[in-house]
Amino acid sequence: MIRLGLCCKFSKEPIRFRTTTATYLKKLALNGTDPKIHLSEIIKHNVTSLEAAITYCSNNHIGSFRIGSDFLPSVTHPDVKYTLNCLPDGAKIKSDLIKCKKLAERKNIRLTFHPSQFVILNSPNEQVVQNAIEDLEYHSALAELVGADVINIHVGGAYDDKASALKRFEENFVRLSKGVQKRLTLENDDKTYCPAEVLPLCQTLNIPFVYDVHHHRCHPDNLSIDEATDKALKTWDREPLFHISSPLEGWGNPKPFRHHDFIDPNDFPKYWKSLENLTIEIEAKAKEIAIEKIYQHLEKEIPLS
């Protein structure tokens, strides 16, 4: 059974996640208002939205939901930094997050995370690495509460020396807590690291490889899609997770990495249709509408959750 995954937001459905900025929170404090009260209200709203998102996915043949990284707004910002325990409604928020975990388990909805591109574990700048580690630890703590099994990142930059950059990733990986390490996955990107470069790192560190077929088409190597798929599957000790998207202006355009609103059925690898246990996150701007459209096409050919 293949499950299709929704990423972070909804296009048409009135389910929204709120956020705020460190600047606004600092302004509240200067005006005599406790920013923790504002944060608590936003996060309670987001927990309610997560419950609604899980329910929607369950009712609309969407088997996975990626939670946005700013679910707890500005949580690692140096001028804000907080924990749920220090918020006015922190205990209830944690309790309700655990309820979301149980709901997702009952509904068989897989929850995942994909931290921002600023989480760079292989940077030569130690402060950037420390910030990345802190951000990953935040994701791990939240993942523990909601039962998410994936925290997916890219390798990072090349810094004019890929061999050294890959070695730095290895060295910094061991600095992560066990909670992060057991959930961390690596993805090929569309400009710097192709599957043939990411796979050996995954194999060395025993990290699952999230194969992004769109990125592979943008930044190819000597591997075919079928070969990259097989190698990726072997890195997983749980249900594999892949990504798919289509180019906004077609493959003949000089910027094929830009995502379309929908998935072109011709971009869905034929080999993937023969797989029996796989999550495919649909990275399309039309969100749940795009999933409905590709679902209607695929359900004629393959079993879907």
Image: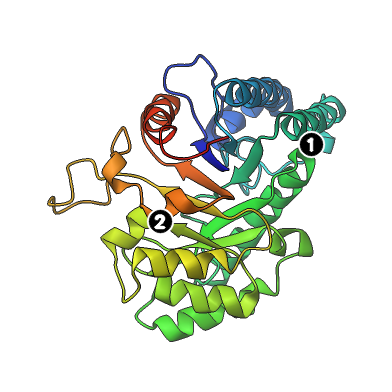
What coloring was used for the rendering?
rainbow
Q: Residue furthest top?
A: 14
Residue 271, labelled with which disc? 2
The reply to whether callout 1 and callout 2 are in contact (CB within 8 Å) is no
Real-space Cα separation, disc 1 to disc 2, in angstroms:
44 Å
The foreground one among 86 and 216 is 216
- Which structural element holds mark 1? helix
Please report the residue visible at 76 percent of the width from the left and 64 percent of the height from the top. Answer: 177
Badge 2 crowding class, 10 Å Cα cut-off, few under 14, some 14 to 19, many 20 or more, is few
Q: Position of residue 32 (x, y in %)?
A: 69, 22
Q: Residues within 10 Å of mark 1 (few under 14, many from 20)?
A: some
Disc 1 designates what residue? 84
38 left or right of 62 in image: right
Q: Nearer the viewer, residue 160 or 6?
A: 6
Q: Residue 66 falls in which quadrant of the image?
A: top right
- Horizontal and vertical percent for residue 21? 54, 33
Residue that appears at 55% across and 67% down: 121
Q: Is 85 on the left or on the right of 232, as rendered?
A: right
Return the x and y of residue 184 as percentages of the image width and height. 63, 60
- Image position of 244 with respect to 57: above or below: below
Image vertical order of residue 84 relative to residue 222, above or below: above
Pick whichever of labels 1 and 2 is earlier in the sequence.
1
The image quadrant where one finds the C terminus is top right
Tag in front: 1 or 2: 2
Give me the residue at 49% from left, 45% from top. 280
Q: Amino acid at mark 2?
A: Tyr
In percent of width and height, residue 192 lies at 35, 68
